[in-house]
Amino acid sequence: MTLTDTTTATTSPLDAARAALRARLLTDGVLIDLGSPGLYGRTGVFERVYAAVDAAGVRSMADLDTEVVRFPPVEPLAAFERTDYIASFPDLAASISGFVGDDRKHRELLAARERGERWEGFLDPADLMLTPAVCHPLYGLLTGTLPDGGRMFDILGDSFRREPSLDPMRLQAFHMHEFVHVGTAASAQAHRDGRISVMRELLTSFGLEIDVVPANDPFFGRVGKILARNQVEQSLKFEFVTPVYGDAGDPTAIGSANLHEDHFGASFAIRSADGEVAHSACVAYGLERVTIALFAAHGTEPASWPAEVRRALAL
């Protein structure tokens, strides 16, 4: 048996489906392999569909009368700490480091590098974190009391989660577009629930088979299992899933609708107009995930996609 035969014999149907999609996206010039799992460059055809997906998403949320805010791909460590993200997802978090040493330290770094050793230990924490969720920087701006009716935000930005994978639907660096409401418990619930049908209709119009399912975040460790179970039992998170890999595996999430309850309100001292701790909710879609799901469903030549899909995307 050849090495190729052995690999094929031990590869699961899901792994094979993931490898086939990745190979097609690379071969057809949709993505560019950057040499690290979950990191890709994107070509013109990808960017064209990506931009069309986001424009359609924004149109679907136009009635929300949002405040548009954009943040950089990094956030201060102090703000990151207040989100408590590190307590629940330490395996996904990533910090930024920089060199602050003198000439002697630099010579030591170069000597280690010359010996083929890892040199990152010569860098010091820069008090910055790669942002894992695009809404994180928002809440520190809202400390205090909200106006009647709360506030609604349109947030688009970079996210980074340290989970390297050859699955093209699971990237380390990606973009989310979130529509976030911060207000009372009732208004947050209304925002989340009211947007589920809107998001489903949008994604279905792209020719994708969509289910809305209860879900949980990937909390870490034994305590995380309890948190995940509670999240499902309390119906705090729903995902919009589509069968990217057919029968080879479970459908893949390409969007979500989430109730944060008062987590961020309590952490950032945000009060609703009635004096209570503010609640928040969001509906969001992953731009790369939706875009790649479209290529998986319809092929890598958008000009050949069904007319109704191209209409929905204004392609």
Image (cartoon, rainbow, N blue to C red):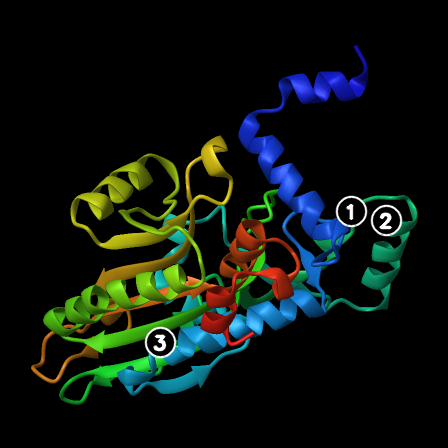
For marks 2 and 1, give the one nearer the viewer: 1
Asked if marks 1 and 3 touch (Cβ < 8 Å), the reply is no
Residue 36 versus residue 293: which sits nearer the camera? 293
Asked if marks 2 and 3 touch (Cβ < 8 Å), the reply is no
What residue is disc 3 on? 60
Q: Quadrant of residue 139?
A: bottom left
Query: Measured along the vertical axis of the image, is residue 16 above or below residue 147?
Result: above
What residue is disc 1 on? 118
Residue 312 versus residue 108: which sits nearer the camera? 312
- Chain-order first, disc 2 or disc 3: 3
What residue is disc 2 on? 112
Q: Residues within 10 Å of mark 2 (few under 14, many from 20)?
A: some
Asked if marks 2 and 1 touch (Cβ < 8 Å), the reply is yes
For marks 2 and 3, give the one nearer the viewer: 3
Q: Quadrant of residue 206?
A: bottom left
Q: Which mark is residue 217?
A: none
Whole-percent x and y of residue 203? 39, 62
Query: Measured along the vertical axis of the image, is residue 137 above or below residue 30?
Result: below
Amino acid carrying mark 1 in the image: Arg
Whole-percent x and y of residue 156? 47, 75
Query: Residue at the left extreme?
Result: 274
The C terminus sits in image quarter: bottom right
Query: Residue at the front extreme?
Result: 307
Taking 302 as reference, is 182 left or right?
A: left
Please tell me which residue is depicted at 23% across the width and 48% down the height of the picture.
Answer: 231
Amino acid carrying mark 2 in the image: Ala
